[in-house]
């Protein structure tokens, strides 16, 4: 089974984020610390486990330049067989739908049996691209899978997802797109030797021309109007005194200042 895993490089969850005064579309400033999106690593780990039981190859795929290649090198350090990067200037001005168009075109070119991706990227948490890729390909799509195995009842896969507190079990014919939820697999920690090898690994490069896409197809349909920092929290008010006294003071503050008690 040949599996394409969609991976994305995102800001480290602990990176410092600030918003410049004015709050325009370019106001967001993120510290230069980057990681592979966590849910994409879960998808990658599951792909490697499926390869171990079914054979085939795991291909890591990303769209974007610059730091995007780091996610591919980490995928190779995990054990991916190939790394493919779509890098084109038009990607710098597109939106999530444009990225989905690019990835779906690359998937068609790679012709896998299965596409795995994280349920959402760790930066915007939109959860859009996986489903959009499936729609553009015309393939079945299962989101937020927590189990994924070869189905004995039919050709394809059997996936389990949690829905409204219950487990939903779905059989899906291949090719298909499945997005990974926490619990599907536990990402490994790559060995140092594999990390070193990944730094020298060949990354296959594609552009829009190679995929048969015109730059106009990536024109954004949604634009960011601006950013606003969350409102500052009011200072903490410490209440002194014994427990009964503090309780009476707290009730008074909730009633008279916070206006949450009648």
Image: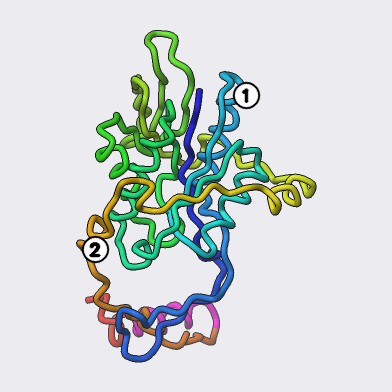
User: Magenta residues, as a range?
Assistant: 242-254
* Residue at x-position 76% and y-position 51%: 196
**Where does label 2 land, which residue?**
220
Q: Quadrant of residue 108?
A: top left
Residue at 45% across, 41% down: 181
* Mark 2 vs 1, N-terminal side: 1
Q: Is residue 104 magenta?
A: no
Q: Which residue is mark 1?
A: 52
Check disc 1: other Cα within 10 Å, few if <14, some if 14-19, many if 20+.
few
Query: x, y percentage for residue 213?
Result: 29, 50
Determine whether the residue tagged by mark 1 lies in a helix, strand or loop: helix
Rendered view: 197 above or below 180:
below
On the picture, is 129 further left or further right than 238? left
Q: Nearer the viewer, mark 2 or mark 1?
A: 2
Q: Determine the secondary structure under disc 2.
A: loop
Residue 144 position in % (x across, y down): 39, 38
- Indicate left or right for 175 with 61 as reference: left
Residue furthest to the bottom in view is: 21
């Amino acid at each position: 089974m040949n599996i394409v895993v969609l991976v994305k490089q995102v800001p480290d969850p602990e990176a410092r984020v600030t918003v410049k005064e004015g709050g325009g579309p370019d106001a967001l400033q993120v510290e230069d610390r980057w990681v592979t999106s966590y849910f994409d690593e879960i998808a990658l780990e599951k792909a490697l486990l499926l390869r171990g039981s079914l054979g085939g190859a795991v291909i890591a795929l990303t769209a974007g330049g610059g730091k995007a290649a780091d996610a591919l090198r980490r995928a190779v350090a995990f054990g991916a067989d190939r790394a493919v990067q779509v890098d084109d200037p038009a990607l710098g001005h597109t939106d999530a739908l444009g990225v989905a168009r690019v990835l779906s075109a690359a998937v068609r070119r790679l012709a896998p049996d299965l596409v795995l991706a994280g349920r959402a990227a760790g930066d915007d948490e939109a959860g859009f691209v996986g489903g959009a890729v499936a729609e553009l390909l015309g393939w079945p799509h299962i989101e937020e899978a927590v189990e994924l195995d070869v189905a004995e009842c039919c050709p394809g896969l059997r996936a389990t997802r949690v829905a409204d507190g219950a487990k939903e079990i779905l059989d899906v014919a291949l090719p298909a797109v499945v997005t990974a939820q926490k619990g599907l697999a536990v990402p490994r920690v790559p060995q140092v030797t594999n990390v070193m090898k990944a730094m020298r690994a060949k990354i296959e490069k594609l552009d829009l021309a190679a995929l048969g896409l015109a730059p106009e197809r990536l024109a954004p349909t949604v634009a960011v109007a601006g950013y606003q920092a969350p409102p500052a929290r009011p200072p903490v008010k410490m209440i002194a005194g014994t427990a009964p006294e503090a309780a009476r003071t707290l009730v008074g503050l909730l009633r008279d200042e916070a206006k949450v008690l009648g």
